[in-house]
Image (cartoon, grey):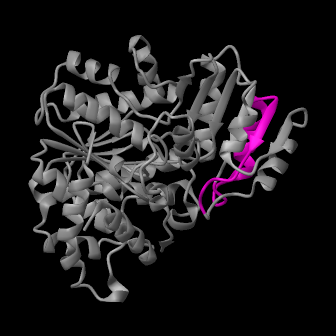
Amino acid sequence: MFYKEAIEFLYSLRLFGTKLGLENTFCLAELAGNPQQQLRFIHVAGTNGKGSTCAMHESIYRAGGLKTGLFTSPHLVSFCERMQVNRIPISENDVVRLLSQMQPLLKQFSADAHPTFFEVITVMASQYFAAQSCDLVIWETGLGGRLDATNIVTPLASVITNVQYDHQQWLGESLDKIAFEKAGIIKPGIPVICAAEAPAAIETVQRIAKSQNAPLTLVTREQAVVLSDLRLPLLGEHQRLNAAVAIETARALGRVIALSDAIIRRGLETVSWPGRLQLVTKPSGQRFLLDGAHNVDGARALRKAIEDLFPESPDALVLGMLRDKDCRHICEILAPLAAVIYVSRVETERSAAPELLAEFCRASNPAARVVICNSLDNALERTASNRFVLITGSLYFVGQAMEALKIATAPALPERQLNEWNASP
């Protein structure tokens, strides 16, 4: 098998969709020798901020001298971003090797019970981190938590960044139902660190933690304010709340992995997480701000960060979104930020129609000039005279922009479509 065939094989697994449940993942892990049982994990769930919080945890423990594994999704450009050791992405050769080992195991499943893409790469990631002898793995959920494939592990700590509205068609229409799914990662006696704010979500997390005899630490915005002197590379007030979560997690694990305050601070002050309020300045002086605000709360956090941090607001907004998101309300939040708005398709079958986004943007900012573009490249060409451009609406869209702006190197094969999934309740 070559890397091209490995990527094609991963694409073929998308045919099995995403089935919420743990039976297949436990079975596949057992066939693989239960590599997850050789590892220590911090398991991270939540609606927004999971990736940033994972990056912070990883940076802290790497600063403490541990060999770290990092498993996150989706990827921005390359599939290899999903599995990293000490922030070095898995090599193409290792992807080929692991999938070659996985294929005989998958033949033991019937067609109607075949493991899905995410189930396969979850077990594959645990195999990789075990082979690399990682001291600690930062382990991000895919969808929800309770029935997510990553929930086959018993971690050192369970982290819930927040509970907000997203993926309601699979997780439930109310915050208490969504919180119930997120809190499904809580294990008996294992510390829980949570930054949820809605009373219904907090009550649900507290109830489940109590039932599992799991000590619970609730992190508040007041704790984030105390971190005002922290030189955090990730922009935005919401990232300071994520940092407070990471600090409380490190403290909760102090008896297992002792870290000094200086190490925790060094880890936070050297963290990197592309595509989230990432500011890029081109040689011409033109600035681009990239952020994957893909739901209402993410859009609110982005708008507040711009209002707080940038006296000169963007003079152009480039927007691309997925149709299964709350496009109308996201446009209501973001459209007033710029006088010129370029709307484009995202390179995915799930893309929202630019014409629909244009309608929402015109309703939310009647004074703006709204331009429908046939591609992101076309939209970027039109921004040539703009000084400060905001690109947002979807992490998929941000990944496209990173390639177009030469921030990231495009892989030889298109790999972003591997982010596609169709979940089955």
Which residue is more in the foreground, 191 or 210? Answer: 191
* Residue 373 visible in rendering: yes
Magenta segment range? Answer: 322-348
Which residue is more in the foreground, 217 or 144? Answer: 144
Q: Residue furthest top?
A: 229
Q: Residue at x 54, y 54 (%)?
A: 175
When the figure is inspected, residue 419 is found, relative to residue 60, above or below; the finding is below
Instruction: Verify whether residue 399 appears in magenta.
Output: no
Residue 180 appears left or right of 25: right
x, y percent for residue 165: 57, 52
Q: Residue furthest right?
A: 367
Q: Residue at x 70, y 15 (%)?
A: 312
Instruction: Verify whether residue 331 appears in magenta.
Output: yes
Which residue is more in the foreground, 122 or 255? Answer: 122
Quarter containing the N terminus: bottom left
x, y percent for residue 198: 53, 43
Query: In the figure, residue 159 lies in which quadrant?
Result: top left
Query: In the figure, residue 324 lies in which quadrant?
Result: bottom right
When the figure is inspected, residue 205 is found, relative to residue 229, above or below; the finding is below
